Every structure is written in C-alpha cells, then in structure tokens.
Amino acid sequence: MDNIAGTKSSLVWTVNLSVVALVLLWTIPTFGLLVSSFRDRDQITTSGWWQSLFPSEQNIVYRIGDADTQRPEGAGFVIDGNVFGDGTGEVNAFGITSREPTAFAPGDVADMGDGVTATVQEDGTYAVTSPVAFEGRSPRLFITSVTPPRFTLENYDRVLFAEGLGRAFLNTMTVTIPATVIPILIAAFAAYALAWMEFPGRALLIAGVVGLLVVPLQLSLIPLLKLHNTLGIAGEYLGVWLAHSGFGLPLAIYLLRNYMVGLPREIIESARVDGATDFQIFIKIILPLSFPALASFAIFQFLWTWNDLLVAIVFLGNSEDTLVMTGVMKELLGSRGGDWEILAASAFVSIFVPLVVFFAMQKYLVRGLLAGSVK
Amino acid sequence: MATATIVIGVAGCVFYFFMSNIVLDSIFPPRGANAGRNILRAGLIRPWLFLMPAIILLTVYLVYPVFVSVWLSFHDSNGQNFVGADNYLWLVNDPKFRESLWNNFMWLLVVPAGSTFFGLIAAALTDRIRWGNFAKAMIFMPMAISFVGASVIWKFIYDYRGDGQAEVGMLNAIVVALGGEPQTWLSQIPTNSFLLMVVLIWIQTGFAMVILSAALRGIPEETIEAAILDGASPLQIFTKIKVPQIWGTIAVVWTTITITVLKVFDIVLAMTNGQWGTQVLANLMFDWMFRGNDTGRASAIAIVIMLTVTPIMIWNIRNARKEMR
C-alpha cells in the first residue's frame, strides 16, 4: 500500500512513529521485568530497572562493630572495619546523624562529641576512635555509596533450586504434554467422523460441539471435583489430563472438522473405491493432510495448558509435589510480594517455553486463530 | 516416574483406537464372501468407535456438570438439603456479589472495546509499513504469556515504595518525574479495576490485531481504488470504506474477547485477590468454593456466569447451522 497515489511522506512518518510507540508500549513491560530478573537484589529495590546500566546510589545505615571488637591504640581506643562488610563499593559521603547523612566527604574526620571521632575512607574502611573505652551500643554511621551496575544469574539459580520452581517446571511438563496429545488424538477421530462419515444425529452433534465451545469452566469445577474425589483421581495427573482434554475438545473438534471438511472429496472417494476402510483412510490420508490444523490446535492447547492456573490448582491441588509453575508464582506473589528478583526470575522461567513455541510456530498459531474465529 | 505416566497416558489412548478398529475389522472382515454386507455393517458402527471417547469426555466434563451445578445451586453448603432459591436470594442481597456483577459489567464494556480498538489500529498501521511483521509479532507476543505471568509483569509496573524511597515501579516513577505523589495504585477504588483491565487488554490486543489484519487484507481492492479516485483521504478510506466492510469480523473478535472476559479469574486472583473493590464473578465463585466451602453459593454464582454466556452460545449455534446448510 506504500505506493498508492496520494500517500504523503508526513503520513508515512506518522504511521511509522505510531507503530514504534505501540510496539514499545507492548514490549516495555515484559522487557522491564526481564532486565530486573538479572539484577542484584539490593539494586532492584533502590533504583528502577531503566537505571540498571548506571551506578546506583544507596543509603546505608551502618552500626559499627561491638564494644568488644575495640582495641587500644595510642592514648585511646579504636573500632574499625569496612562498612560494605565483604562486599565492595564506593563511599560518596557519610554522616553521623540521620538528619545530615551526607555531612562529610570520604576521608574527613567527624567529631561525634566527647572526643570521639569517626572517619570513613572511599573504599569503605572506617575507624572510630575514643579517648575512653567504648561501652554499650556502638554508634551508627550513615553512608551514601555508589555501587556499580551488577548483573547476575543468582536469581535464576535461587528460584530453580531453592524456591521449588525446578520441580514445578517438571510438573508443568507432566501436565502439559499428555494434556496436549490426548485431546488431539481423540478430537482428530471425532472430527473425521463428523466431517466424512454418514450417520444419524451428525448435525445435532456438530451443533452440540459449537454450543459447548463457550461453556464456562467455572461451571464444571465443583461437580467434577466431587466426581474426581469419588473416582479417587483428585490430585492425580490423570485427573488433570482428563479435565484439560475435556475442556479443550470442543475447540479441537471444531477446528479439525472445519479443516477436514475442506479436504478434496475425490481423494477419499477413490480410496474407498480401492477398498480402504475408514480407519485406513483416516490414518494414511487424512491425518497427514491435516497436519497444519493439528499443529494449530496443538499450539493452542499447549499454550493454554502450560499457562493455566485454575484447572491445575483445582484438580491437582496445592501440594508441593504437584504444584505447577503458575501455582508457584501465585503463591510467591502472595508470600513474597516485594521480592521482585524472585518474582521476575520465576516469571521468566515460566514464560520462556511458551515464548519459544510461540515464535517458532507463529504461522500455525495465526492460521488456527483465523480458522477458529473468522468462520 | 513422570515420564512413565506420560507414556502410559498417551499410549493408552492410541491403543484404544487401534484395538477397537482391529476388533471391528475382524468381526466384519472387509473381504471374503460377505465383504459388501460386512463393510456396510462396520460402517454403521465405526463412526461411534471414532466418536466414543470424545462423546464420553464431553458429556462427563462439560454436559453433566451443567446439570449438577443447577442441582447444587438449589441445595445448601454441602449439597445435602434442598433450600429452594435461598442461594439466589442471598446472591441478590450480597454486596460482594453486586460489586462483582458491576465489575464484570465494567470489564465487559472496557476490555473488548479496548482490545478491538487497539487491535484495529495496530492492524491498520502495521499493514502499511515494511517492518510490519516484526511489529505484529511484538504486539502479539503477550498472547503466549500466562495470565499469572502477565500479572507479575504488571504488578511490577504498579509497584509502590513510598516513604521517600526511590520508586522502582514504572507508573509511580513517571508520576514522580512529572512532579506528582506516588500512589498505591492497586488499592485505590475505582482506578485499580481499570488497571487490572489494562493487563487483559494488553494480552488480547494481539489476538484482535491478527484476525482484523486478515480481514482488512481480504477487502476487495476495487472499493479502495474507487475511493482513492474519488479523492478520499487515508483516514476517510479507513473509517468509511474499510471498517464498514469488516463489521462481521469485528463482531466475532468482540464476542470472542467477551467470552474470555466473563471467565477472567487469574489476573484478579494474582493481583488483588478481589480486595479493594476489584472482585469479579469467577474469582468470587472460586472464593466460595475453596475458602467459603459452600458448594450451593459457589454453584449459584457459576450458573450466573453460565447465563451471561448463553446468548453468545445460541448466536454461535445459529451461525454454525446456517453455514452447514
């Protein structure tokens, strides 16, 4: 459409800039969390992720070593150490009261009264001296420091191994794979029957499938949980697979039937004339030809089951052994609402697989969407 | 262990289809003296072999629960005693239910409209530029992210620190940069509900864009050429020529998103858990099911959700039947 007469260059610019704005709006939220997932825990809480490439300024309140770490020096006593502990940093300024936390430059000597003096060097080493021995609670120092940007994989290490997300990843896989394959198999057979076999009640069944497309999941939860309890498959993977298969079937049958109906009649007729049974026709001709539709639905169902929270927590329960990733994340949001390094890393562990599938198979996903709703 | 269960689950399914068909073919062999009659007889039975698992699953998981839910909604908290319409009467008088109903109504107004609007704009704009496919992929991407994942992403944006600390949430950082006071966004009524809706709009826009973009490309070129010859501006072409031709598709996108909205649950659960006036029907139902332990009330809420979807269901079935003829 670029070359249509009457297109002005100012319009081209507006269009391009608007799309840039849209794309930024749609990607920045995710990008911000992605950056945060690699940042150091302390830095996340002291500066926004957009400042992550610059050194961050931190305010530390540091209580100097106890009275029993003091040692005599010259005529008095001294307590010394490093305000960063084992870490590193650069002191910009320090102070001895909370009202003036930046009163002194590094290297200055601050007078704390009664002959007590404190000094902090740029590298964080400090020394507090006193003419008489220190007693009771030791004084505090107020440090303004600058830490260089730090990126780390620690957050991922922690969520995968300490927070139980690694286990949850496997659980999610165990739920997702059969919950994707089983409905495809079942739906493919059913779709073939509804598309190419003659039998009484066919139209009614198709209408039924279309109607079931929109039945809300919520309606099924209580009755099915009761049923699963009676059958003894509540909290078992089998129960979740069946539930996901049942909920995914209407869309699967609908998509696959629409596709199969469009296949050329001659192929199927000639195979029948050659004496093939419907089972052979289905396995050898229809299934391979329907690959695009099968792939479309497979992606849908995969994304849906991988990302699902409701079905998993209802039918698998909240126990640690079977909790899926979305479940872990929901718990973390509740219990560690402010620990963004944990939340960010968990989110990306769970988003990673669907994103890869999404970008690798986008063509089929789009095709499936079009077949499923433009009709 | 997990792999073993996976293999058993999938293999069991394959086994059924192969075995049942082999058995059928051995009872009515499609060759020999009675080949013709056998093929006919097998043909009467085979559709049902193909359909059996699907019919059983659909019946057990989608049809049967509708009836049980209706039954449960007329019974007390553990489904023992018949209580008539008590649960529904309670619903009507419950402030939380009214709040949920109102919120669901707002979600229904805002989210489909927002997603369709942004989707339409994105579709129209990205079709005109060279890097449109890349832009589309980026806007479409949130579709792959779980609702819970999206909740984490957006909760980070709405984060509030306060107490003079640096704001690490983007929204508050922008507010502060513009000279405002940081806010606790998620607990402020009624803004918070709209902030939750933003998350769903963000997810669903890509879907709307993909469908509408295909529809826009399907518009006959002649109509557009004619409009250009008549001197229509690009904006006029879009609003007066293109959009009217894809009303059908817009309606489909709208209803599809509407269905998603009616079932919205994860976002509210993960971000506010229905506190601060953000409750919605699906989460209220979940609440009464697990925390309230009251199957009667929970089922009554589920029935209300079902009733709101029913018009769309009937419309869908009608359309499908029209197509079949």
Image (spheres, rainbow, N blue to C red):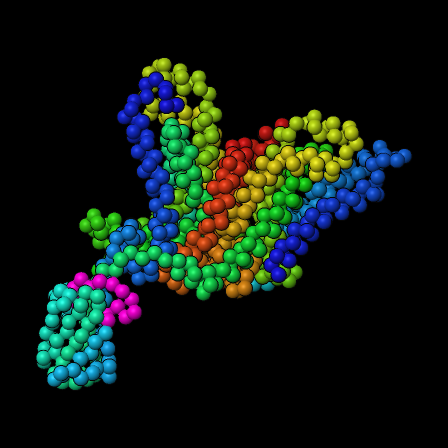
Q: Nearer the viewer, residue A143 or A322?
A: A143
Residue A55 position in % (x across, y down): 25, 56
Q: Residue furthest top?
A: B229
Q: Quadrant of the N terminus of chain B?
A: bottom right
Q: Nearer the viewer, residue A49 or B233?
A: A49
| Residue at point 25%, 49% (across, down) | B174
Q: Quadrant of residue A27?
A: top left
| Residue at point 44%, 25% (across, down) | B245
Residue B158 position in % (x across, y down): 32, 53
Where are the magenta residues, as a range?
A82-94
Q: Is residue B59 above or below residue B322?
A: below
Q: Quadrant of residue B5?
A: bottom right
**Count of marks, rendered view:** 0
Q: Is residue B202 above or below residue B124?
A: below
Residue A138 position in % (x across, y down): 20, 79
Q: Is residue A289 left or right of residue A337?
A: right
| Residue at point 41%, 25% (across, down) | B242
Residue B240 position in % (x across, y down): 37, 23
| Residue at point 81%, 34% (across, down) | B40
Q: Is residue A301 left or right of residue A27?
A: right
Q: Is residue B193 visible?
A: no
Query: Is residue A119 shown in magenta?
Result: no
Q: Nearer the viewer, residue A366 or A110?
A: A110
Q: Nearer the viewer, residue A142 or B200?
A: A142
Q: Is residue B276 left or right of residue B320?
A: left
Q: Quadrant of the C terminus of chain B?
A: top right
Q: Quadrant of residue B254?
A: top left
Q: Is residue B164 visible?
A: yes
Q: Residue furthest front?
A: A74
